[in-house]
Image (cartoon, rainbow, N blue to C red):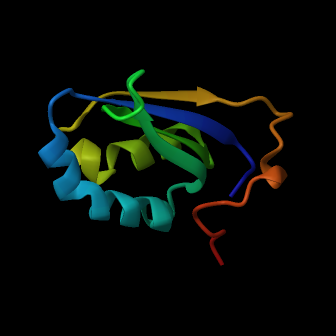
Amino acid sequence: MSTTFWLMVCRHRPGLDALRAAHRDAHRAHVASGGGGLARVLVGSATTAEDGASPTGNFGILEAASREAAEAFAAADPYALAGLVETIEITPLSAQFQAHRIDPMTPRAA
């Protein structure tokens, strides 16, 4: 896999906390597997409203071979498949991005 890095921002539809909870374990498994090898997740987290508690979405920094692979990873997320995700934004990161400073959430493929 090349060292192309992407910022993925997923905005969730409001008021779907039960749907999010129902798919959380599958979402975490998707992240851990890199979507079956589509991407490696270096870091990611849920995003919240200003209150720090109301969920608004999730983000991740991905290593993927192409924009298409990063987009496929995001689209295959159980949250997206369940209809929770309203928008997905994939933005390339600078070639100077210091990925070596992050302890990845997804292991490098063998």
Residue 77 located left or right of residue 96: left
Q: Position of residue 49 (x, y in %)?
A: 38, 24
Q: Quadrant of the C terminus?
A: bottom right
On screen, 14 above or below 29? above
Instruction: State the residue at coordinates (21%, 53%).
Output: 21
Horizontal and vertical percent for residue 40? 59, 57
Task: Name the image quarter holding the N terminus.
Answer: bottom right
Query: Within the image, what quadrant is residue 22 found in?
Result: bottom left
The residue most toward the front is: 51
Q: Residue at x 14, y 47 (%)?
A: 19
When the figure is inspected, residue 71 is found, relative to residue 103, above or below; the finding is: above
Could you say which quadrant of the image residue 16 lies in? Answer: top left
Query: Can residue 61 be seen in the rendering of this structure?
Result: yes
| For residue 3, side relative to residue 44 (left or right) | right
**Of the pair 88 and 26, the residue shown nearer to us:** 26
Percent coordinates x, y for residue 15 in the rendering: 15, 30
User: Would residue 49 appear left or right of 40 to someone viewing this image?
Assistant: left
| Image spot of residue 73 (x, y percent) | 43, 49
Image quadrant where residue 25 sits: bottom left
Q: Is residue 1 above or below residue 90?
A: below
Query: Which residue is drawn at the image coordinates 62% and 69% (left, top)?
Result: 107
Q: Measuring 66% from the left and 68% from the top, which residue is drawn there?
A: 108
